[in-house]
Amino acid sequence: MNCLHPQMCGQNQHLQKDFFLYTASKAKCKTYINLREVTERMHLPPGEYVIIPTTFEAHQDGEFILRVFSEKNSTSEEADTTIGSDKTQPIVFVSDRARANKEIEHDGIQGEKKKKPKRKLLQPEEETEEEKQFRAIYQQIAGEDMQICANELKTIMRNVLSKHNKVKTEGFSLETCRSMIALMDTDGTGKLNLQEFKHLWKKIKEWQLIFKGYDKDKSGSISSFEMRNAVNDAGFHLNKQLYDIIAMRYADERLNIDFDSYICCFVRLEGMFRAFNAFDKDGDGIIKLNVLEWLQLTMYS
């Protein structure tokens, strides 16, 4: 049991690792051993406390009973986070510039041309040296149609990651590549063009930096607890139930998550948040789907 800092009182938030590293416990069970039942009676001064139930072995389920006697009314609640996303926004690709230019040039109503002030047409952004390398790799594999399927994306990502060996990984699985395509496939072709691929790589680089920050031993995996913080750093805010689902879905038997599963999870979160926001027209956090819309949303993600 830890006493909260005055600045944290009254706030419902997920406590980070540093809180437990630098905040001493005010009370705890004296006999912390592996027994069927452990009880303890504690007497504490008035204040706000965070109570952390724990098990003798990590990642085990257990039941806890807490009984509080107080002179005045007291309240308690489960520390949780409001579900949401900071960075999920509609994707606008450079490949849409021609359409935007056309709309600028032919701005009229029912065929009537209206005089508009001349506006500068959108021009392709100047490529960096890294983007030129991607284009060369992309052109070698994409072929004449300049679009890539999941198998081709897997090959490209393996080549790209080998040139940016910041995280230990053997590349992405075919299923992860399919999820990536579903996330970035704005025209519904089941393939990615160069601009969609570049946007995808930009997202992966951002997530890669977060992963690297938690993979201190460079093992190529992070723990389920570190995954919670990584998800939060990426701008996704989930609750305990969703974090548990992520651990069950993407972690191994030791509750570690490798880079491939990590990226697959982030791709799924990004895609599902973006799809939800597209349906949530009035922004009230509630959407209504029929069975066809539900199946389309969940099957192609």
Image (tube, rainbow, N blue to C red):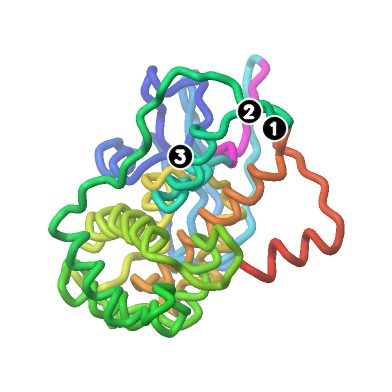
Local secondary structure at mark 2 = strand
Find residue 298 and report its image quarter. bottom right
Q: Is residue 171 visible?
A: yes
Residue 301 located left or right of residue 139? right
Q: Dot 3: what SS?
A: helix
Estimate the x, y position of residue 284 in percent, counting from the top left.
72, 31
Q: CA distance from mark 3 to mark 2?
A: 14 Å
**Residue at the image position 19 percent from the left and 77 percent from the top:** 162
- Foreground: 296 or 176? 296
* Foreground label between 1 and 3: 1
Disc 1 designates what residue?
A: 111
Residue 293, image x and y in percent? 79, 59
Q: Say which mark, if any, is on residue 101.
A: 3
The answer to whether residue 210 is above or below residue 154 is above
Residue drawn at x 31%, y 42% as measured from the top left: 123
Identify residue type, mark 2.
Gly
Q: Are marks 2 and 1 in contact (CB under 8 Å)?
A: yes
Which residues fall within the magenta stretch? 73-83
* Residue closest to the eye, 164 or 253: 164
Q: Residues within 10 Å of mark 3 (few under 14, many from 20)?
A: some
3 or 2: mark nearer the eye: 2
**Is residue 287 covered in magenta?**
no
Distance of label 2 from label 1 (alpha carbons): 6 Å
Q: Which mark is residue 108?
A: 2
